[in-house]
Image: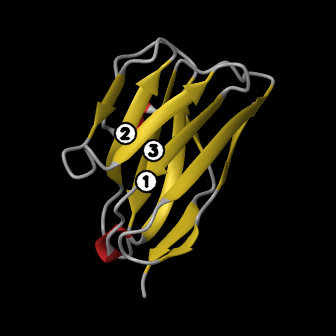
Amino acid sequence: QAQLVESGGGLVQPGGSLRLSCAASGSIARMFVMGWFRQAPGKQREFLAVINSGGTTKYSDSVKGRFTISWDSATNSVYLQMNSLKSENTAVYYCAARNTLVNLSPIPSTYNYWGQGTQVTVSL
């Protein structure tokens, strides 16, 4: 089984930046699509960005222009560079992946592997 391990969360002031990392490992570690979601308390899991192994990306309108997703195929890792963070971006951020070829999708049920989540808090 594959595992996804996230890192890079923490406390940041409004307007600041963070870079999240997610590494896939395990016996079925080749992923074809990897993405990021977040979930704030009392809210549904929200799609942020997704990338496929060919480098094609898709973003939600809420983060387009502020967040950038990237993929390092050598390490089977995906990154999320987050700039101009706002207090409403406070949430647990999750990495997700699919080990079969699918279209870029904002729907959580598309992904068959999930990380444990990393907390991002945007506050003074």
Inter-mark Cα distance, 3 to 2 = 5 Å
Which labelled disc corresponds to residue 82?
A: 1
Task: Please name the amino acid that badge 2 sits on.
Answer: Ala
* Nearer the camera: disc 1 or disc 3: 1
For image coordinates 58% across by 58% down, the residue present is: 117
Observer able to see residue 40: yes
Where residue 95 sits: x, y (%)? 54, 45
What is the x, y in percent for residue 58? 30, 30
The earlier-in-sequence mark between 1 and 2 is: 2
Q: Is residue 108 visible?
A: no
Within 10 Å of disc 2 (Cα), the crowding (few <14, some 14-19, many 20+) is many
Point out the image quarter for the C terminus: bottom left
Which element carries disc 2, helix, strand or loop? strand
Decide if residue 58 is on the left or right side of residue 61.
right
Residue 47 place in picture, x, y as percent = 33, 46
- For badge 1, the amino acid type reads Met
Contact between labelled residues 2 and 3, with CB atoms less than 8 Å apart: yes
Residue hosting label 3: 36
Up-down: is 112 above or below 91? above
